[in-house]
Image: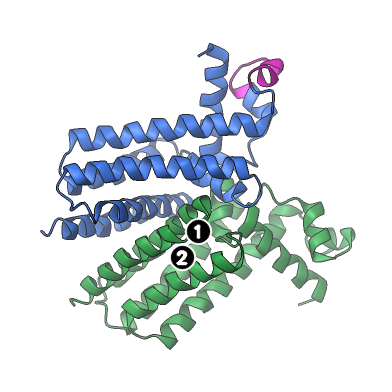
Chain colours: A blue, B green
C-alpha cells in the first residue's frame, strides 16, 4: 500500500478510537497524518465514508489478528480472556484512556445514518466473534456454546471499555473481566 | 421546566441515542424540537456542551428510574436482568435500531476531548450502577458481590446494544443476556 494512504488509514483509525466518526474532521486527519490535503481525495475519491470503510476493514483485521495471537499464546480460554481484558486495561492506561474501540465508536455515531459504514462495523464485529469462537473451540469449549459465548465475551469487553473511558478508571474492565472469566470456566465445566 | 427547554432536552436525548454527540447538529436539533433558534442560546447560553450536560443529567435520572421500576416489579435479580435485556430488545426493535444508549454514544465521542461531558457520562453510569446494585442487594445478592456484579451487568448490556445496533439484529442482546442471567444466578448461589 502507498505510504501516504497507509498513514491516512492508520491516523483515521487512531482518531475514530479517540473521538468517533462524526467528530473526526478531515482537516485534523490530514494534519495528524502529515499528508497533503489533495491526497485524501486522491486515495478516497468518494470522501469520508470511503476512508471510513477502509479504516474499519483495517481495524477489523488488526484486532482479529490480536485475538488469534492471544489464543495462540494462551490456549486455555479462561487465561486468554483474562489476557484480553488485561491488554485493554494496559491500552487504556498507556493512552490516557484515549484508545477505545474504533468499531464501537463508529457504530454509535452512524448505525442509523450511514448504511455502508454500519455494514462495515457489523462485519468487523463478526470477524472478531469468529476469531474468539475459534479460540474457545480449540481450548475445549463445546461447539454449541462457543459462538454464543464469543458474543457475550465481546459484548462485555466493549461495554466495559465504554464505562472505563467514561470514568477514566480501569476498574469496570477488571470487575467485568472477573465475571467473564467465571462464565468461560463454567462453559468448560470447571 | 419551560416547555421549549424540555422539548430541546428530550429531542437532544433522542438525537444522542441515534447519532451521538458530535453528529448531532444544533440546526437539526432545533428543527426536530420545533423550537426557535434563539431559544437554544436563551436556555443554554454556554452552547452545545451545556445542552449536552443537561441532556445527560436528564438521561441519567430517566434510566435510573427505569432500573428501579424493573427491580420493584421483579424483585428476583435473575428475572429483573432478563427483563432489562428484553426491554432493550424491544426498544431496538420498535425504534428500527435507532434508540441506543445516549451515555455510551456521547462517551465514545467526547471522553478524550470534552472533560465536562465526560464527567456527566461517568456520573450517569455511576447512578445506574448504584440503582442496579440496590436491586441486586434487595434481591439477595451478597453485599460484597453486588457492586461488581452491577458493573458487569451494565457493561454487558451496553456492549450488547452496540453489537446489536451494528448488526441490526437483537441476537447479540439475547446471547449476552443468557450468560448474564447465569452469572446473576451464580451470585445468588443457585
SS state under label 2: helix
Q: Is residue A37 magenta?
A: yes
For residue A157, the mark is none
Residue picked out by circle 2:
B126
What secondary structure characterizes most of the magenta part?
helix
Q: Residue at label 1?
A: B122
The stretch in magenta equals: A31-43
Q: Residue at x 52, y 64 (%)?
A: B124
**Residue found at the very far front of the displayed protein:** A144
Residue at point 36% right, 66% down? B177
Question: In which quadrant is the C terminus of chain A drawn?
Answer: bottom left
- Answer few, some or many: residues within 10 Å of disc 1's Cα (few below 14, many 20 plus, some between 14 and 19): many
Can you give x and y, in whole percent of width and height, for residue B38 in the image? 89, 59
Q: Residues within 10 Å of mark 2 (few under 14, many from 20)?
A: some
Q: Do discs 2 and 1 belong to a common subunit? A: yes
**In the rendered image, the vertical position of residue B151 relative to residue B142, given as above or below:** above
Distance CA(mark 2)–CA(mark 1): 6 Å
Amino acid at each position: 500500500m502507498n505510504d501516504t494512504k497507509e498513514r491516512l488509514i492508520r491516523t483515521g483509525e487512531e482518531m475514530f478510537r479517540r473521538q468517533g466518526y462524526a467528530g473526526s474532521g478531515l482537516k485534523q486527519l490530514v494534519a495528524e497524518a502529515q499528508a497533503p490535503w489533495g491526497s485524501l481525495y486522491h486515495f478516497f475519491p468518494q470522501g469520508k465514508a470511503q476512508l471510513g470503510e477502509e479504516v474499519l476493514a483495517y481495524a477489523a483485521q488488526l484486532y482479529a489478528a490480536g485475538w488469534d495471537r492471544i489464543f495462540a499464546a494462551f490456549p486455555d480460554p479462561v487465561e486468554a480472556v483474562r489476557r484480553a481484558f488485561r491488554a485493554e486495561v494496559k491500552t487504556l492506561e498507556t493512552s490516557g484512556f484515549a484508545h477505545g474501540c474504533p468499531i464501537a465508536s463508529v457504530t454509535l455515531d452512524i448505525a442509523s445514518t450511514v448504511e455502508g459504514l454500519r455494514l462495515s462495523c457489523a462485519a468487523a464485529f463478526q470477524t472478531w466473534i469468529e476469531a474468539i469462537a475459534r479460540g474457545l473451540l480449540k481450548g475445549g469449549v463445546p461447539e454449541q456454546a462457543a459462538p454464543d459465548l464469543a458474543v457475550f465475551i465481546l459484548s462485555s469487553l466493549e461495554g466495559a471499555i465504554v464505562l472505563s473511558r467514561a470514568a477514566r478508571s480501569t476498574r469496570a474492565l477488571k470487575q467485568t473481566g472477573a465475571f467473564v472469566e467465571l462464565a468461560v470456566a463454567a462453559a468448560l465445566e470447571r
